[in-house]
Image: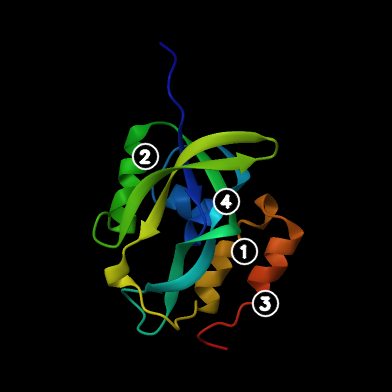
Amino acid sequence: MPDVVVRYFAYGSNMNPARVRARGLQVLAVRGARLAGVRLTFDKMSRDHVGVGHAALDFERGSWVEGVLYDLAGTEDILRMDRFERTPINYSRELVRVESGDIELVGWTYFANRAVRQPGLRPSRAYLAHLLAGEPYLSDAYVRTLRALMCSDD
C-alpha cells in the first residue's frame, strides 16, 4: 500500500516556511494553493498580545484565500502542529480541498473557534510579516492585498 501524503494548508503565520520548520515539522515539498468558499479575517484573539488579531477563516461563497501548502513527512507532523494551534481549544483541524495550479489536493487546515474570536481586531506588522514570507507561493495580487492591510501598530 502506498504512503499517504499528509498536507497542511497554511493561510496565517505558518505561511512562513521557516516558522513551520522551526516548529519541528518535516516538510517534503512546499507550493502555493487556494481555498475556495472562505475569506481571510484577523479576528482570532492573540493569546500574547491584547488587541491584536490573528488569521481566521469565515465561510463566504465566491471568496477564496491563498496560502502555502506543505507536504509533510507523516501524520506526526500535523499532530505536532495541533499543539502550536492549541487544537481543539483555539482551532479545530479540518480536511479541505485546495487548488494548486490546475490540480485539486486534500490537506488539513485550521478554523478558529468562535470563543476565541473578536470583531474589529487587526494583525500586527510582525505577524503580517509571517504571512508575507509566503510571497514566493502567492499571486502578486494577493501579496498586494496583504501589504495594504491596516495593522494594529500603524
Left or right relative to 84: residue 109: right
Q: How much space separates mark 1 and mark 2, taking CA atoms? A: 23 Å
Instruction: Label 4, secondary structure: give it.
Output: strand
Vertical comparison of 151 with 75: above or below: below
Instruction: Label 2, secondary structure: give it.
Output: helix
Q: Which residue is mark 1?
A: 132
Label for residue 36? 4
Nearest to viewer (mark 2 / mark 3)? 3
Which quarter of the figure has residue 101?
top right
Q: Name which of mark 1 and mark 3 comes first in the sequence.
A: 1
Note whether residue 78 is visible: yes
Label for residue 148? 3
Label for residue 9? none
Q: Name which of mark 4 and mark 3 comes first in the sequence.
A: 4
Percent x, y for residue 118? 36, 78
Vertical comparison of 22 with 147: above or below: above
Vertical comparison of 7 with 21: above or below: above
Percent x, y for residue 72? 46, 36
Nearest to viewer (mark 1 / mark 3)? 3
Q: What residue is drawn where x is 61% and y is 46%?
A: 33
User: For the N terminus, which image quadrant?
Assistant: top left
In terms of depth relative to the viewer, which is nearer, 70 or 102?
Answer: 102
Note whether residue 16 is visible: no
Crowding around mark 4 (Cα neighbors within 10 Å: few <14, some 14 to 19, many 20+) is: some
Crowding around mark 3 (Cα neighbors within 10 Å: few <14, some 14 to 19, many 20+) is: few
Residue lying furthest front = 61
Residue type marked 3: Ala
Label for residue 77? 2
